[in-house]
């Protein structure tokens, strides 16, 4: 089971929150060229849903890619994030 993931708000100005099932491991936010700008582990102990709040306030306005990678190495979330301040 690859699990389910979601993120909000979109567009974001200061923070984005990612929710994933318990097999979720790493969150990456990259620019459109593929350069990873944020990489964070999700070490929340909530067994039902893992929730991670990520600071994106230092990113410039624009479009970014957001990925959640499970402990199995599979991508559970592949989305487009808009940063707008």
Image (cartoon, helix red, strand yellow):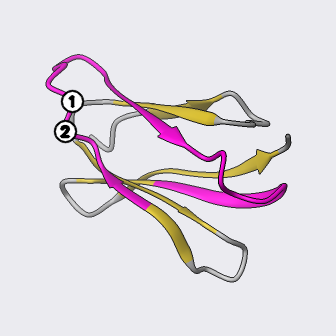
Q: From the viewer's perspective, is 18 left or right of 71?
A: right
Mark number displayed over residue 44: 1
Q: Position of residue 19 (x, y in %)?
A: 43, 28
Q: Position of residue 43 (x, y in %)?
A: 19, 38
Q: From the viewer's perspective, is 21 left or right of 56?
A: left
Where disc 2 sits, the SS reads loop
Q: Residue at x 26, y 40 (%)?
A: 1
Q: Residues within 10 Å of mark 2 (few under 14, many from 20)?
A: few
Residue 57 occupies quadrant: top right
User: How many numbered marks are there?
Assistant: 2
Q: Position of residue 50 (x, y in %)?
A: 30, 27
Residue 44 located within the stretch drawn in magenta: yes
Q: Residue at x 61, y 47 (%)?
A: 56
Q: Residue at x 34, y 54 (%)?
A: 40
Q: Position of residue 55 (x, y in %)?
A: 54, 42
Q: Residues within 10 Å of mark 1 (few under 14, many from 20)?
A: few
Mark number displayed over residue 43: 2
**Nearer the observer, 45 or 56:** 56
Are the two marked residues, 2 and 1, in contact with CB atoms closer than 8 angstroms? yes
Residue 70 located within the stretch drawn in magenta: no
Mark number displayed over residue 25: none
Magenta part of the chain: 39-67
Residue 3 occupies quadrant: top left
């Amino acid at each position: 089971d690859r699990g389910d993931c979601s993120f909000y708000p979109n567009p974001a100005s200061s923070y984005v929150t990612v929710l994933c099932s318990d097999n979720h491991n790493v969150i990456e936010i990259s620019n459109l060229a593929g350069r990873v700008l944020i990489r964070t582990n999700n070490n929340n102990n909530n067994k039902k849903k893992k929730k991670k709040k990520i600071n994106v306030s230092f990113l410039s306005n624009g479009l970014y890619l957001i990925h959640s990678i499970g402990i199995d190495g599979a991508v559970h979330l592949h989305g487009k994030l808009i940063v707008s301040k």
